[in-house]
Image: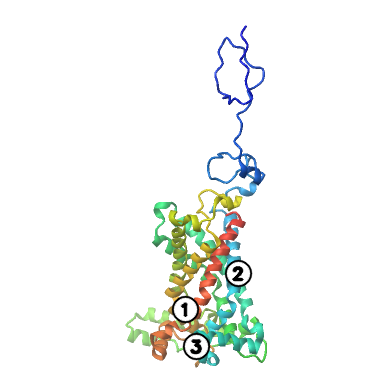
Amino acid sequence: MSAAAPQHAGSNVSPRRSVSPDQPREMTPPPPPPQPHDDRAESAGNKPAICPSDHASIVPLEKPSPDTKKIPKQSWEYAVRSGVAGGIAACAAKTVVAPLDRVKILFQASNPRFQKYTGSWSGALKAISDIYRQDSVRGLFRGHSATLLRIFPYGGIKFLAYEQIRGAMIRGKDQETPVRRFMAGALSGCASVFATYPLEVIRVRLAWETKGTARITVRDICRTIYNEHPRVPPPPSAASLHSEAHLPKPAAEAIAASSVAMNKVTLGTGLSNFFRGFTPTLWGMLPYAGMSFLTHDLAGDFMRQRRFASYTVLPMSERSQRQLAPNKPAPLRAWAELITGALAGFVSQTASYPLEVIRRRMQVGGVVGDGHRLTMVEVARNIMRESGYRGFFVGLGIGYVKVVPMAATSFYVYERMKVWFRI
């Protein structure tokens, strides 16, 4: 009877080696092949890597925990988490630039007290100093409480809607086009404006007030806006519509009756005062939100190119377990993410600023002038007549100083909150 050859401790025995039929089988299984030494696994305290030779992160050989499961984008859980992440990001961004935001509103709305400061960078600093000298820090953050009440749902709805609309419009790499990205951003911006515009009007009016004799509350501003009744032209009569517009008599009577009813509702409730400037806001939101998300996505793609990835993309060894989800773009370093957000703010602000100036003028229409409710075209004509084309860009310099860090903070915090919420 032949005995099995002795095995040396240093020999590398393959567990799949075939055994001759005339040889007896071993009673004990062959020893496993020695594992290659992995300093990364030892230092991290993890189990051996699945593929020690690759550059992947050390993944323990165990089932993933329920916390790391993938959440479907079309689920309610994903929508709630993305909405909360967007709201927190928007609040953080607005808090960073709150003093500059108030000065910009005072410049845009042509507040008589601050007209002397417009037109220069030093004027913005002098305006901030003037506000601080009169009302201290509270004056720089006047209206910020209303801002946070508005910006949390605004940011939450905007980012939530963008994720859902983008998922519906872009289902693969072949559909990842600039037009679809722009439309997803524009529609998400419009959805957020529909839900939060009255709070925006309240915030602007709080920031516009500069009288320091008494503290002005949100309730006071709401009462003031509600009770403002601008002069409305008399509704057309049925006879004039029939003779001048050549409308059939039944149609002219119906239009005249509807006009009378609308005038009564407007003058009796004052609710329409909370939607001053709503039309230019929608027009302005299309290029602002569309260009913002489009520029952020394009800048992110540029940063992730192979030639820049070693400088801009977070290395695998520095990523957390939550950042290793499949089918996700590689996370950027902090400075790279801030730059992409800053570029998005710069481009979107430039594209939408003229419409923003028109909107601010319409929102304070019950405060300045004779209270006549001007249309979007009338406001644009007045600006052109008073200041020329430069009037549409008054305050743009401070607008850049405000929007660029705000957009950078917003996108940065949102991307980090997505990691925190595992979406």
Marked residue nearer the N-terminal end (2 or 1): 2
Q: Amino acid at mark 1?
A: Glu
Q: Secondary structure at mark 3?
A: loop
Counting from the top left corner in percent of width and height, residue 108 is at 50, 84
CA separation in Å, label 3 and label 1: 17 Å
- Identified by mark 3, the residue type is Thr
Which mark is first along the chain, 3 or 2?
Answer: 2
Q: Which residue is mark 2?
A: 92
Question: Counting residues from the N terminus, which is met first, the one under dot 3 or under dot 1?
Answer: 3
Assess whether mark 1 and mark 2 are in contact (beta carbons under 8 angstroms).
no
Name the foreground residue: 75 vs 29.
Answer: 29
Pick out the residue farthest to the top.
Answer: 1
Which marked residue is nearer to the observer: mark 2 or mark 1?
2
Q: Nearer the viewer, mark 3 or mark 1?
A: 3
For disc 1, the marked residue is: 356
* Residue 203 drawn above or below residue 117: above
Q: CA distance from mark 2 to mark 3?
A: 27 Å
Image x and y of residue 250, in percent? 38, 79
> Does residue 199 appear anywhere in the picture?
yes
The quarter of the image holding the C terminus is bottom right
When the figure is inspected, residue 306 is found, relative to residue 3, above or below; the finding is below
The label on residue 147 is: none
The residue to which callout 3 is attached is 118
Quadrant of the image occupied by residue 125: bottom right
Whole-percent x and y of residue 229?
Answer: 54, 88
Task: Please tell me which residue is depicted at 61% across the width and 40% down the height of the picture.
Answer: 38
- The residue sitting at 58% across, 64% down in the picture is 413
User: Which percent across, then down, holds residue 189?
Assistant: 49, 68
Mark 1 secondary-structure assignment? helix
